[in-house]
Amino acid sequence: MADLSRTRLDRDEVARAGVIALFLPMHTATRLSLPVLDRIREINPDAHVCAYGLYAPPNAELLRARGVRTIVGGEFEADLVSIARAVQIGHAPQLASPAGVDAPLPRLQLIAPDRRGLPSLDRYAALAWPDGTRRVTGYTEASRGCKHRCRHCPVVPIYNGRFRIVDPQVVLDDVRTQVASGATHVTFGDPDFWNGIGHARRIVTAFARQFPGVTYDVTIKIEHLLAHRAHLKELVDTGCAFVTSAVESVDDALLATLEKGHTRADFEKVAGEMRAVGLPLAPTFVSFTPWTSLQQYADLLTAVAQLDLLEHVAPVQWSIRLLIPAGSRLLELDEVRAQVDPFDPIALAHPWRHPDRRMDQLHRQVSSIVGDSGKTSRTGIAAAIVDAIVAMDPTVHVPHIAASTASPSIPHITEPWYCCAEPTEGHAALL
């Protein structure tokens, strides 16, 4: 087992392997896998190469051209075992179900992951507290998939509105192993922790009882935070350090296009409810889309400033540009198909340009501001972005943001990139 975001490809291990499986759970991992596949084919052309995860089926044609023989989508564990056993005895692998949208999803009896052989937890992102202290951070999942079908979400092409829960004891055993390895914080990586709120509540109640002093963070939709706001205090009481929520925009028309299931008013209500119970909200955005005007981008900054959430927003969020990968539901829209370029096998996405060239220019400027931020506070970064907008068009209404040198006012994970973003320089250096 190897994590190529932290270690280099081991030539000797590749040469010895009969089966090599690459996990492609997100865009960055898939981008990074392409040169890795070339190296694998060069070192061991006879190995049976498999790609599995959310981004494997939508990119199947490209992956097969790079030497991948078997493609597996969601709920992949049983299929991986079948592949390994079949190759061992010289048979062709038989998968439980074809990979792709609407393919049957097996209900697996999972066991706790075995992470032996991976780098130690202290080599990964940590939880940073406002006072500068850090906590070694583990990762687990209490569920997979999502019962929602947001148009831009990479989960949808595989799960298509379905989700599967993980047995609570398996989750807790996984956490226990990581706590024993030094974790004092755990990220629940579920696409939406409250897809099955009864299951989630059982998990966090047991978590708090069995791991006192260990904190956690989760991702929950605005829609669910609002509908189940009566349970927000329970998250605080069981050790939740913060909640990430994919707000995406404060423009109701764009939210409807993305089928997010919430409005700007809902976001504002949730921000108030969470502040009232003392639970930090970490909103994420798709700040640049083909439909976002310069004024609408400024309105996003204004809304976040008015809600006193500037220090809650990771700098990279101001530069996130809508990614349209293979299989995206966005391609169902005529206006999207008419605007995007053909699929780019290098970028692994359909490129697009904004009809207002200033927006693409602003994206480059914001990316530079975020990338060069160094020790600049999050509020200071937002102020610099406002200055860039005003320099571009002084008629745009922008918020007044006083530059600050304060540290982020909420706990946050130190990983400097975002799941749908381009690889960082650090990741690219591993290629």
Image (cartoon, helix red, strand yellow):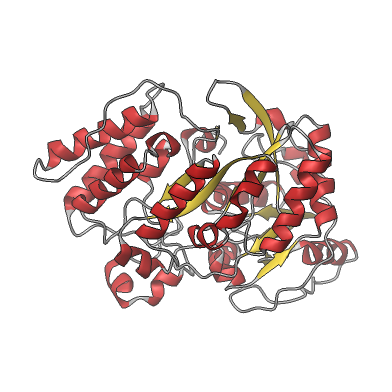
- Viewport quadrant of the C terminus: top right
Q: How far across and how far down the image is residue 109, in percent?
A: 84, 65
Given residues 424 and 290, the one toward you in this image is 290
Q: Which residue occupies the foreground of this view, 256 or 117?
A: 256
Query: What is the quadrant of residue 301 in the picture?
Result: top left
Given residues 54 and 272, the one toward you in this image is 272
Q: Quadrant of residue 97?
A: bottom right
Residue farthest toward the left in the current orientation of the protein? 395
The N terminus is located in which quarter?
top right
Q: Position of residue 386 (x, y in %)?
A: 23, 36
Number of numbered discs present? 0
Which residue is rendered at x = 60% and y = 66% of the image? 146
Instruction: Mark yes or no: residue 361 visible.
Output: yes
Residue 200 vertical placement versus 404 (above, below): below
Q: Is residue 95 left or right of residue 65?
A: right
User: Is residue 113 visible to the viewer in this orientation of the structure?
Assistant: no
For the point 44% across and 37% down, which residue is it? 312
**Residue 64 picture location, percent across and down:** 60, 65
Toward which corner of the image does residue 325 lie, by quadrant? bottom left
Residue 161 screen position, x and y as percent: 58, 73
